[in-house]
Structure formats: structure tokens, C-alpha cells
């Protein structure tokens, strides 16, 4: 069935639409007639224009620690009242709000004063601003904010960074404009988590510097690094390589591989130190990274282990014609648990050794037994009663034990201190 729409209805609809457009167009022209965007919209110019705001963070683009730059994406919500933007909705077909471009109306002249490279105004010019019939504004300037943030890398990679983003209101003094936050923290309704940094805390506020006659907005972000990547790819390999220093003294001295093995471990630690230094900013303030200090200590310990391995080989290759010092002899006896072979119950000056022999003989079917004892006097100075001698090979074995224990203790101390300080 074919439906016929009266032509008058079509004309009426078009007329209403045209009338609504014309009404809004006339309203905007009326509001902008004689409007001076360089003058804030306050009836009493001796009073302050209060700008209320909040900040919504969208995501963390990057945190470049080497260059001290934090880049975040977000937008403000700014609201103030402009008495020139008021009208009676009944006179304009119940129109309660209109939109303008920011170039046509008064807006707060907010500059990112903590910018990393260049100063720029808040938002982009193409973003519109809405006013309702009571003169309240609704402005949502958005941008990628690149701010300077000097990192504190002492606890890297278990560090927490606090970055302050400052915006200054230029052109007006503290007696003309005031800022008030809706809430005292950053909104995270549309926030997307970063793969390396956790946003744990945040705060927003306003600061008035009466001496400089400037007003600042600040946004403080507390970022905590997730250390799992660095733990698996840097810290644990360094600890594993450090354990190899202990095994140097388990290699036989005759193998000739001790020095080469220890130098290889030394070079491996040096490589990890280079990798760590490439990821960290080349700064000494406020503090140098604890990880760099640990790698330097491990490098020094590896150099020391290499030196001790050479000293141990020196003992092994010492000529037997050279007498072992008494101090080294005494220490080596304690370490190797060596003692004299003579019986402690024997006389200090000498002792008598007696041997008994039994003789068996059968006479007329009877067994006759006779015993014969032979005695021999010995002096305590006889060569057979000398204590076990200590050779240079024994000194080398002692040095291996001492150096290995030292390496174990140094390895444990280095890693325990790092773990306690870093975590």
C-alpha cells in the first residue's frame, strides 16, 4: 500500500530545521557582538575569575630516563563563568548551549612551563569550547604533554620516580584569576596501563606565587618501575656469572685453565656493565645507580679472583729446594688438618720398642711354646718420628681453600647487600 505524505508536512519540517539553525546562528552572532576575548568575563573586574579544573590521563607514552623526558597523553576539563555568554533559552527556541572555537572567546592562557624542549599553549586551536545559558564553560583541551623529569636511578631497576608537571597562567596575576581543582588527584577512568611503569599515586593542585605574581597548576605522578624484565635479563645473569668465580679454585692447577677461565668471567661482567650503562642516564645527581655500583664491585672482585688464581699457581710451581716459611707451615697444618705421626703417649726424650716372638716345637707328640722378647731404644730425634712435611704443593692447596672461601663470602655479601638496599 502506497503512503502519501502531505507536501505541507515536508515544508513544515524543513522550516523548523531551518528556523533552529537560524536561531542558533543568530544566538552566536549576538553573543560575539562586541565581545573582547582579551578581557575576562567577570562583571566586577576587581574580583577574581575562578577556573575549576581536573586532569584525565589517557596513557604514558614514554619515560626517557637518559634524556629526562616524560611524555603522557591526557586532557583537562576547565570550567569558569563568563557573564557575557548568558541568554534566555525561551527566546532562542529552548537552546541551552552553544559552541565556539577557542580563538573567538576568552580562555585561560595556560602554558606548559615544565616543558622538556619547547613552550606551548594548552591544547590545540581546533578544539571547541561549549557555553551553557548560565555562562558556564566546558572546555576539554587535550594534547601529548612532554615534560622534563629528572630521574632518581639509585634503586634501578626497583626505582620509583616522582614527576611534577607544571602549567603556568601567563598574562594574569594572582588577584585576577584563581584555580581550584574538582578533585585532588588525576582521573584514570580511561587510563591504559603502561608495560613498564605503574602509576601508583597522583595529585593535582594550584600554587599562587605572590612575589612573582604567577599562578601554577601542578600534576604530580608517582611511577613505579616493574623490575621483572631487568631481573631476568640482567640481574640474575650477573649473579650467575659471579658464582663462576668460586669455581676457579676447583680447577686442577695442572690443567692450565684457571687464568683463562677467570679472565673470561671478568670480561662477561664487563659486558653486562656496559649494557647497564647504556640503559641508564649519564648523570651523577642525585645519586649513581646502585646496580652500577654492584657491577663495579663484581668487576673488582673478579679482578681480585684472577690475581688470587695467579698467586695460587705461583705456590704450586715453587721449587721444593726453597724452604717453606714456618708461619705458612703452621697455617697449612691447621687448614689441611695434618699432625705428627708419633704417638702422644711416648716419652718426649725417647721410648723403648719391644717385639715378642713365639717359637713352637713338637717333642714326643707334645707342643712346647717358647717366647723371645727383643727390645730396642729409640730417640725422639730419629728421622722416622718426624712430623709429616709441608710442601709448596700443600701451600697451593691451602691457598685454594682460603681463596675459595673468600670468594664465596664476597659473592654472598655483595648480593645480599644489593638485595637489602634495592628492595
Image (tube, rainbow, N blue to C red):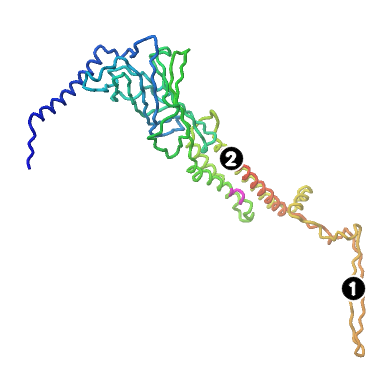
- Disc 1/disc 2 C-alpha distance (Å): 70 Å
Prevailing secondary structure of the magenta residues: helix
Residue segment shown in magenta: 243-247
Q: Nearer the viewer, residue 413 or 52?
A: 52
244 falls in the magenta region: yes
Residue 255 image-quadrant placement: bottom right
Residue 418 is marked as 2
Q: Nearer the viewer, residue 333 or 258?
A: 333
In the picture, which quadrant includes the C terminus? top right
Which of the two marks, 1 or 2, is nearer to us in this view? 2
28 falls in the magenta region: no
Residue 129: x percent and y percent?
A: 30, 23
**Is 201 located above or below residue 396 in the figure?**
above
Residue 83: x percent and y percent?
A: 31, 15
**Is 113 located above or below residue 243 in the figure?**
above
Helix, strand or loop status at disc 2:
helix
In the picture, which quadrant includes the N terminus? top left
Q: Which residue is mark 1?
A: 356
Outermost residue on the bottom side: it is 364
Label 1 crowding class (10 Å Cα cut-off): few <14, some 14-19, many 20+? few
Compare marks 1 and 2 and give the one earlier in the sequence: 1
Horizontal side of residue 331 vs 153, given as left or right: right
Horizontal side of residue 59 vs 417, given as left or right: left
Residue 50 is marked as none
Residue 378: x percent and y percent?
A: 90, 63
Residue drawn where x is 29% and y is 12% of the image: 36
Helix, strand or loop status at disc 1:
strand
Residue 269: x percent and y percent?
A: 54, 43
Horizontal side of residue 349 vs 126, given as left or right: right
Amino acid at each position: 500500500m502506497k503512503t502519501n505524505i502531505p507536501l505541507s508536512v515536508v515544508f513544515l519540517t524543513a522550516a523548523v530545521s531551518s528556523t533552529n539553525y537560524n536561531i542558533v546562528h543568530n544566538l552566536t552572532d549576538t553573543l560575539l557582538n562586541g565581545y573582547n576575548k582579551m578581557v575576562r568575563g567577570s562583571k566586577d573586574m576587581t574580583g577574581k575569575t575562578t577556573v575549576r579544573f581536573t586532569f584525565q590521563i589517557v596513557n604514558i607514552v614514554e619515560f626517557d630516563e637518559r634524556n629526562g623526558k616524560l611524555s603522557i597523553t591526557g586532557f583537562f576539563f576547565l570550567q569558569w563563568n563568563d557573564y557575557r555568554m548568558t541568554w534566555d533559552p525561551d527566546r532562542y527556541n529552548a537552546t541551552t548551549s552553544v559552541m565556539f572555537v577557542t580563538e573567538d572567546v576568552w580562555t585561560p592562557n595556560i602554558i606548559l612551563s615544565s616543558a622538556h624542549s619547547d613552550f606551548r599553549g594548552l591544547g590545540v586551536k581546533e578544539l571547541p569550547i561549549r557555553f551553557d545559558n548560565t555562562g558556564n564553560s566546558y572546555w576539554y583541551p587535550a594534547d601529548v604533554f612532554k615534560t622534563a623529569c629528572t630521574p632518581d636511578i639509585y634503586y634501578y631497576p626497583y626505582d620509583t620516580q616522582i614527576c611534577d608537571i607544571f602549567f603556568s597562567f601567563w598574562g594574569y596575576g594572582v588577584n585576577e584569576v584563581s584555580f581550584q581543582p574538582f578533585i585532588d588527584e588525576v582521573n584514570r577512568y580511561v587510563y591504559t596501563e603502561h608495560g613498564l611503569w605503574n602509576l601508583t599515586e597522583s595529585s593535582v593542585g594550584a600554587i599562587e606565587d605572590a612575589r612573582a605574581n604567577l599562578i601554577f597548576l601542578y600534576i604530580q605522578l608517582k611511577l613505579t618501575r616493574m623490575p621483572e624484565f631487568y631481573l631476568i635479563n640482567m640481574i640474575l645473569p650477573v649473579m650467575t656469572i659471579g658464582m663462576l668465580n668460586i669455581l676457579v679454585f676447583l680447577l686442577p692447577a695442572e690443567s692450565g685453565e684457571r687464568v683463562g677461565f677467570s679472565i673470561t668471567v671478568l670480561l662477561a661482567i664487563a659486558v653486562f656493565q656496559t649494557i647497564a650503562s647504556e640503559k641508564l642516564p649519564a648523570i651523577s645527581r642525585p645519586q649513581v645507580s646502585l646496580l652500577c655500583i654492584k657491577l663495579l664491585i663484581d668487576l673488582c672482585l673478579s679482578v681480585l679472583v684472577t690475581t688470587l688464581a695467579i698467586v695460587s699457581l705461583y705456590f704450586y710451581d715453587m721449587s721444593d729446594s726453597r724452604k717453606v716459611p714456618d708461619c705458612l707451615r703452621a697455617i697449612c697444618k691447621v687448614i689441611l688438618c695434618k699432625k705428627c705421626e708419633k704417638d702422644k703417649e711416648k716419652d718426649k726424650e725417647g721410648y723403648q720398642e719391644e717385639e715378642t716372638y713365639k717359637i713352637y716345637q713338637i717333642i714326643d707328640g707334645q707342643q712346647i711354646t717358647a717366647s723371645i722378647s727383643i727390645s730396642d731404644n729409640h730417640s725422639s730425634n730419629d728421622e722416622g718420628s718426624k712430623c709429616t712435611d709441608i710442601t709448596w704443593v700443600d701451600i697451593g692447596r691451602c691457598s685454594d681453600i682460603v681463596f675459595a672461601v673468600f670468594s664465596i663470602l664476597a659473592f654472598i655479601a655483595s648480593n645480599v647487600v644489593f638485595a637489602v638496599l634495592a628492595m
